[in-house]
Image (cartoon, helix red, strand yellow):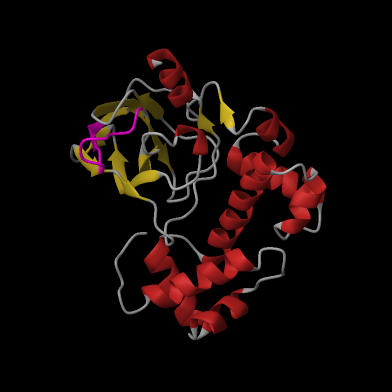
């Protein structure tokens, strides 16, 4: 969520809840605008301002987020899951899923929703900037075991991050060789004791855009984790299993 627009947030939240309850149906921008009780133009503008992304992209992200859940919790086939979340073509569903999550639906299911390692997506450059700061826990005396930190071109964390790292715990981070551009930093963790829940009720922090020009970053980032909200875009990428490895090592 990019802004706390109190007068309109309940309307947008009602739209998101309606989407989640009707994923198998064809949902248009006109449908969403009617649910919000706004004109189509006003709805699109407000939705973008409140969530940070367009209604269409948010809808697509929710469909894929539900597909991730179904792949891990049911025995439905990939075709059946695609249909259940609103795709009429299994090819379109599989292509979109792989582009956004980083794995095919079958591989995502086989790997249990996690990958051994998350690689950077952009080429390295000696002139790239170093982005650094601190990730702070929002859970007081019970910080999460591991924290994923990544840079993305917009507020939906999907595909391959431009740069990323995994911290053993909340604290200082550093991302080197950051290419020029406008980036959004995402940090995600899970509450202690919920490490096997993956995307269920994660802790998140989103900051941006961070402007990198000519290898320079304007300031050090100080970011605090918080519980994910309804208005936050879903995290689509498959996360690293580093937190599970850390738990196993500590046990």
The residue segment tinted magenta is 132-145
Count of marks overlaid on the render: 0
Q: Is residue 138 magenta?
A: yes
Vertical relation: 48 (above or below) 38: above
The answer to whether residue 2 is magenta is no
Q: Quadrant of the C terminus?
A: top left
Q: Is residue 178 above or below residue 71?
A: above
Q: Nearer the viewer, residue 121 or 86?
A: 86
User: Where, by quadrant of the figure, is residue 222 drawn?
Assistant: top left
Q: Position of residue 126 (x, y in %)?
A: 34, 20
Q: Nearer the viewer, residue 97 or 70?
A: 70
Toward the viewer: 216 or 185?
Answer: 185
Residue 249 can be seen, yes or no: yes
Residue drawn at point x = 18 percent, y = 39 percent: 219
Q: Residue at x 28, y 32 (%)?
A: 215
Is 216 on the left or on the right of 112, as rendered? left
- Residue 130 is situated, as x and y percent measured from the top left of the image, at 27, 28
x and y percentages locating residue 170 in the rendered image: 27, 31
Secondary structure character of the magenta stretch overall: loop
Q: Is residue 35 left or right of residue 209?
A: right
Q: Is residue 180 above or below residue 155?
A: above
Check the image and name the residue furthest to the top.
249
Query: What's the residue at 36%, 34% (across, down)?
Result: 192
Q: Is residue 183 visible?
A: no
Residue 84's quadrant in the figure?
bottom right
Q: Residue at x 60, y 34 (%)?
A: 113
Locate residue 62, reporting x and y percent: 57, 56
The quarter in which the N terminus is drawn is bottom left
Q: Is residue 195 left or right of residue 212?
A: right
């Amino acid at each position: 969520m990019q802004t706390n627009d109190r007068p309109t947030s309940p309307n947008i939240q009602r739209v998101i809840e309606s989407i989640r309850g009707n994923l198998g149906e064809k949902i248009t921008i006109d449908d969403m605008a009617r649910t919000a009780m706004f004109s189509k133009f006003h709805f699109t503008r407000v939705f973008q301002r409140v969530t940070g992304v367009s209604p269409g992209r948010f809808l697509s992200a929710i469909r894929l987020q539900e597909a991730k859940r179904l792949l891990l919790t049911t025995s439905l086939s990939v075709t059946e899951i695609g249909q259940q979340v609103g795709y009429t073509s299994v090819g379109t569903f599989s292509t979109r899923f792989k582009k956004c999550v980083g794995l095919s639906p079958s591989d995502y299911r086989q790997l249990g929703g996690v990958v051994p390692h998350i690689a950077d997506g952009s080429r390295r450059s000696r002139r790239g900037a170093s982005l650094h700061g601190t990730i702070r826990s929002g859970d007081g005396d019970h910080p999460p075991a591991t924290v994923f930190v990544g840079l993305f071109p917009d507020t939906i964390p999907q595909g391959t991050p431009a740069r990323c790292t995994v911290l053993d715990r909340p604290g200082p981070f550093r991302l080197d060789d950051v290419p020029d551009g406008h980036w959004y930093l995402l940090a995600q963790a899970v509450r202690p004791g919920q490490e096997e829940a993956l995307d269920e009720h994660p802790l998140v922090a989103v900051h941006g855009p961070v402007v990198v020009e000519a290898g320079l970053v304007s300031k050090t980032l100080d970011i605090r984790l918080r519980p994910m909200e309804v208005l936050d875009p879903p995290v689509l990428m498959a996360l690293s299993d580093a937190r599970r490895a850390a738990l196993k090592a500590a046990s």
